[in-house]
Image: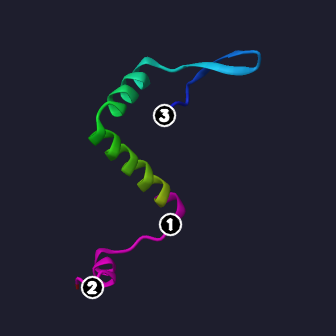
Amino acid sequence: MLEHVQLIKADEQAMFAVIPYQEYLFLKEILFDEEKLADYLDYLHTQRVKKQSSKRLSLAEVKELLNLA
């Protein structure tokens, strides 16, 4: 998201950001709905964790670690 942002500067300082209209609508929808915002933040956190750890566990391993087996 926000790969296509145009910054408008005055005196070398960014004053405005222009984004595609569809991205604006998406951000507006998320920011005005607490549940959607929480879901999106959870999604971003999950993506960050996935990047940090490449190790994957099987369901059996997870159950064993959680003492559910």
Residue 47 horizontal side relative to residue 4, left or right? left
Label disc, if present, on residue 67 of the rendered structure: 2
Instruction: Give whichever of discs 1 and 2 has the lower sequence position.
Output: 1
Tell me which amino acid carries mark 1.
Ser
- Which residue is painted at 34% across and 75% down in the image? 58
Q: Regarding mark 2 in the picture, which secondary structure is present there?
A: loop
Residue matched to label 3: 1
Distance from the alpha carbon under mark 3 to that under mark 1: 23 Å
Tell me which amino acid carries mark 2.
Asn
Distance from the alpha carbon under mark 1 to that under mark 2: 23 Å
Quadrant containing the C terminus in the rendered view: bottom left
> How crowded is the residue under tag 1: few (<14 C-alpha within 10 Å), some, or many (20+)?
few
- Which residue is painted at 29% across and 34% down in the image? 33
Q: Quadrant of residue 26?
A: top left
Between 10 and 61, the residue placed more toward the observer is 10
Label disc, if present, on residue 37 of the rendered structure: none
Q: Please state the extent of the stretch shown in magenta in the rendering.
A: 50-68
Between 51 and 29, the residue placed more toward the observer is 29
Residue 32 horizontal side relative to residue 24, left or right? left
Image coords of residue 36 (percent x, y):
30, 39
- Which residue is painted at 27% across and 85% down in the image? 67
Residue matched to label 1: 54
Is 31 in the magenta? no
- Which residue is painted at 43% across and 25% down in the image? 23
Q: Regarding mark 3 in the picture, which secondary structure is present there?
A: loop
Residue 47 horizontal side relative to residue 58, left or right? right
Image coords of residue 61 (percent x, y):
33, 80
Q: Are marks 1 and 2 in contact (CB under 8 Å)?
A: no
**Front disc: 3 or 1:** 3
Q: Quadrant of residue 32?
A: top left
